[in-house]
Image: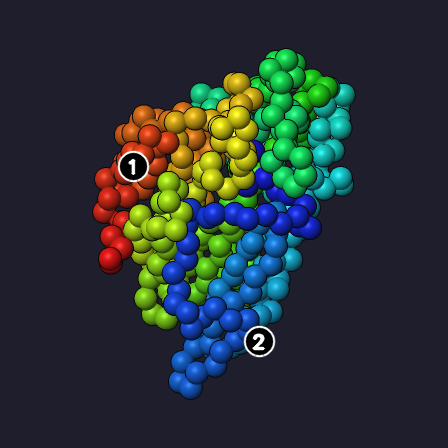
Amino acid sequence: MLQASLRPRGLSRRRVAMALPLLGSALWHTGAAAVAGRAESCRTTRVLMGTQVDMVAEGPDGPLLRHAMDRAYAEMQRLEALMSRYQPQSVVRRIQLAAGITPVAVPPEVMAVLQSAQRVWAQSGGAFDVTVGAFTSWNFGPGAKVVPEAAELARQRPLVGAQGLVLDNQAGTAFLVRQGMALDLGGIAKLPILEAGMKVLRSEGVENAMVNGGGDVLTQGLWQGRPWRVGLRDPRSPERLLGVVAVAGSGVVASSGDYERFFFHAGQRQHHVLNPRTGRPTSGVHGVSLVARDVAAVNGLGAALMVQGAQAGRALVQRAPGLAVLVAGQDGSVWQSPAMEALLEPVAS
């Protein structure tokens, strides 16, 4: 469940995003393009949270768009610095260093993410767990790839368990109860950070915008007067699209999968989505896509379903029938909820 980890900005890697904005070739240039009698559009790309973050905005004032986008990136960078386990001065690192010793004061933005993580942990029966940060032996980043020995994972497993993360909302503190425990917010922090960037755009008067962070796509308003279109890649064959989702107004398309960071060892794919109960990569599910109107409805659920499997997706939809869910199995199967079947448009051959 180390997915989409908030990695140092200096690191780059090849990523295959399951959700792909489809905006037409005319858009993809840097800067604003003024067309007589039409709104201007602006697109920028930066590396944040260890992935490429694309931002597209449309409006009547090009300089305003660029100013708003700069402010949005600055806010996302500020939040990344608070929540990344890879930045030595982050709040997450301070919580880890104080594990088993003392509670740590956390700002409201971090507390909100930690509380969300605890809710998903409870709802998923422990399938989603931000204390998987204690599984430190894996290396999916640059350099030598590491597959931990069974004895090493057995030593680390007792340090994993979100019941050991104590949040005191009144005091504004977080505490890991055992030394050696650690947090990894990669599966729960990215969407709120992207959402914070979108809120900045709105506060600056930008009504039509899209933010894409490594395949997690947030939208507001329209693109050239029409709904935003987001293609869902087939995780079994990433060069192919399973279909296209049209999103008008506020929306989020979130994705998780075993195809983002992985390597092969002894003929088996070792990927970064870890089962908190075993410390080993999940099996059975290749990728998950979810579509909703707001981040709160889907945040953390993709990683949880990677651990739980497709059957859990069906149970989830029974509790939230309006949620659009797609689960691609490693056996080649693709399951869609009724809401996803209604949204997903076939791709013209």
Report the colour scheme: rainbow
Residue 316 coordinates in the image, percent (x, y): 33, 30
Mark 2 vs mark 1, foreground winner is 1
Q: Amino acid at mark 2?
A: Pro
Camera-side residue of 313 and 121: 313
Camera-side residue of 83 and 302: 302
Residue 127 coordinates in the image, percent (x, y): 47, 24
Residue 249 coordinates in the image, percent (x, y): 37, 58
Q: Amino acid at mark 1?
A: Val
Camera-side residue of 60 and 253: 253
- Distance in Å between CA atoms under marks 2 and 1: 44 Å
Q: Residues within 10 Å of mark 2 (few under 14, many from 20)?
A: some
Above or below for 236 versus 171: below
Q: Residue at x 53, y 26 (%)?
A: 266
Secondary structure of residue under mark 2: helix
Secondary structure of residue under mark 1: strand
Above or below for 200 versus 344: below
Tell me if 295 is positioned left or right of 229 in this view: right
Residue 175: name its quadrant.
Answer: top right
Q: Which residue is mark 2?
A: 63
Q: Residue 99's mark?
A: none
* Quadrant placement of the C terminus: bottom left
**Residue lying furthest front in this view?**
266
Q: Residue at x 40, y 37 (%)?
A: 287
Q: Residue at x 54, y 39 (%)?
A: 261
Pointer 2 or 1: first along the chain: 2
What number of labels is visible? Answer: 2
Q: Residue at x 62, y 18 (%)?
A: 149
Above or below for 1 versus 342: above
Residue 177 coordinates in the image, percent (x, y): 68, 19
Q: Residue 334's mark?
A: 1
Residue 338: name its quadrant.
Answer: top left
